Amino acid sequence: MERDGIPSVGDYLIMWVLLCIPIVNIVFLIVWAIGGSSTPEWKINFARAYWVVLVVSFLLGIAFWGIFAAALGSAMRF
């Protein structure tokens, strides 16, 4: 449990376990990112930062596979 607004190791472990479960992770990230009066600010910031990392990773993945597909298509013409 939190003490003086500082999350404990248990708080992080519970968050990690919840984020490892498919579909549940998306739901919890949305709830935490939107926040509320009962959601601690550190959890709101964590969820928002996690979304940024997810979006950037997704976009980089699309760019990588686009470049890979273009290179493969170009190599198959010869």
Image (cartoon, rainbow, N blue to C red):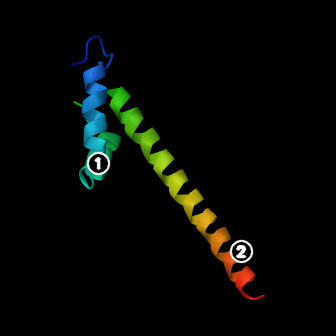
Per the image, label 1 sits on a secondary structure element best described as: helix
Q: Position of residue 48 (x, y in %)?
A: 42, 41
Q: Amino acid at mark 1?
A: Asn
Instruction: Tell me the residue at 59%/57% (across/down).
Output: 60
Instruction: Tell me the residue at 31%/20% (across/down).
Output: 7
Q: CA distance from mark 1 to mark 2?
A: 35 Å
Quadrant housing residue 72: bottom right
Residue 19 visible here: yes
Q: Quadrant of the N terminus?
A: top left
Per the image, label 2 sits on a secondary structure element best described as: helix
Q: Position of residue 73 (x, y in %)?
A: 68, 82
2 to the left or right of 77: left
Q: Position of residue 40 (x, y in %)?
A: 30, 27
User: What residue is shown with label 2?
Assistant: 71
Residue at far bottom of view: 77
Q: Which mark is residue 5?
A: none
Asked if 24 appears above or below 9 in the picture, the reply is below
Q: Amino acid at mark 2?
A: Ala
12 to the left or right of 46: left
Pointer 1 with pointer 2, Cβ within 8 A: no
User: What residue is shown with label 1?
Assistant: 25
Mark before the other along the chain sequence, 1 or 2: 1
Asked if 50 appears above or below 72 in the picture, the reply is above
Q: Position of residue 2 (x, y in %)?
A: 25, 17
